[in-house]
Image (cartoon, grey):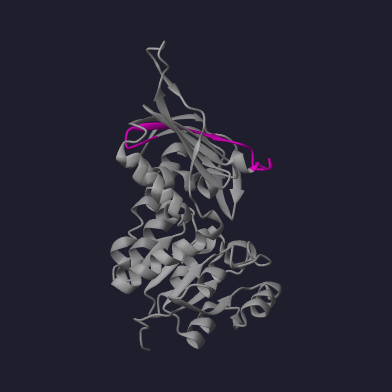
Amino acid sequence: MVLNNSPPYRAIVIGLGQIGQGYDYNKDNSLFLTTHASAYQYHSLFELVGGVDLNPKNCQLFEEKYQRPTFNTVAAAMDALNPVVASVATPTDCHLETFTSLLPYSLRAVVLEKPIAGDIVQARQLTELAKDHSIAVLVNYVRRYEPGTQELRKMISSGLIGDVYKGIVYYGKGFLNNGSHFVDLLTYLLGPPALISIVNSGRSINVSGVNDHEADLVIAFGGVPVIFLSTRYECVLPPEGWSFRLFAEKGIVLYGAGEIKYQVMEQGGANSDNDVFNFQYKSIDSDFDRYQYHVISALGTALLEGKERDQFDNKGALEILKLFRDSHD
């Protein structure tokens, strides 16, 4: 079997549900690229060659839209298609099993849905297997690859809003399932995480076959304390409900509802000795409607440069699971 070391890189999607193909299935893909299948299909560095799913309806939908074959086993797909990249969009409790089934084949990279696994033991086992078989694993925390988020990081680093000293996060549908997005994002923006305290461990819920919690807690990122507040799983959050705020010496950042905004402290009037906020928010150009495309772009660039194993080390994904374990042991 010959490795595909030049583009377009042959890619398959394992798990053809919502994030695999569903979220943007009936949308204009010139505007929306929010699934693994569409991101590969419309990226010049990749060729979508097939899919895997146990559900015949999902397979039918995939074949109708993408005109590519589907299979009900990983082995059948790998033998027939010889991909160099695979996306694993199966339920979390199947990640290790699915990843292990890929090991006999000559893959360079796997894009793995978050969280990396259901517990820290499985996560470490998966990471060690990836290392032993020289496979890069990119855990699909999409926001750090989005251009507006990258611009926000530059803005914070530049000191435009001064030192960030506090934050608050609102999330729903489980700490591992959705809260972990914020952990990864704030790690990217501010620095490594450390658990400070548990305010309320919350209800235990099952998400994607894994035990999760609706926890309220305080985590420090690079020394900046951030409060995490959870809604209940059955409560449907409006777009602004999945968001965070960062408070800094010279300004405020609002992140959520598909946009990134900030305001900067301005000097008070002639009769004031105090700084005041100009409440006219400024927006950072963002591209959340194509978030999966940006993930795949980052992977494609790394593959071209031969740096995929260096760039995607999964330390952050393991740290997220360690935080979860520490907060619920």
Which residue is depicted at the point 32% across and 37% down?
222
Above or below: residue 230 compared with residue 59: above
For the N terminus, give its image quadrant.
Answer: bottom left
Q: Is residue 154 visible?
A: yes
Query: Would residue 326 be found to the left or right of residue 204 on screen?
Result: left
Residue 239 on the magenta span = no
Number of callouts? 0
Above or below: residue 60 compared with residue 263: below
> Among all residues in the image, which is located at the extreme right?
57
Relative image position of residue 156 (x, y in whole percent): 35, 40
Relative image position of residue 227 (x, y in whole percent): 47, 31
Q: Is residue 187 visible?
A: no
> Among all residues in the image, which is located at the extreme top?
271
Relative image position of residue 73 (x, y in whole percent): 56, 78
For the C terminus, give its image quadrant.
Answer: top left
Which residue is depicted at the point 43% across and 54% down?
147
**Residue 241 is drawn in which quadrant?**
top right
Towards the viewer: 72 or 191: 191
Relative image position of residue 214 (x, y in whole percent): 57, 38
Which residue is depicted at the point 51% across and 88% down?
80
Residue 222 on the magenta span = yes
Towards the viewer: 302 or 18: 302
**Residue 27 is drawn in which quadrant?**
bottom right
> Among all residues in the image, which is located at the extreme front?
270
Stretch in magenta? 220-238
Which residue is depicted at the point 49% across and 56% down?
114
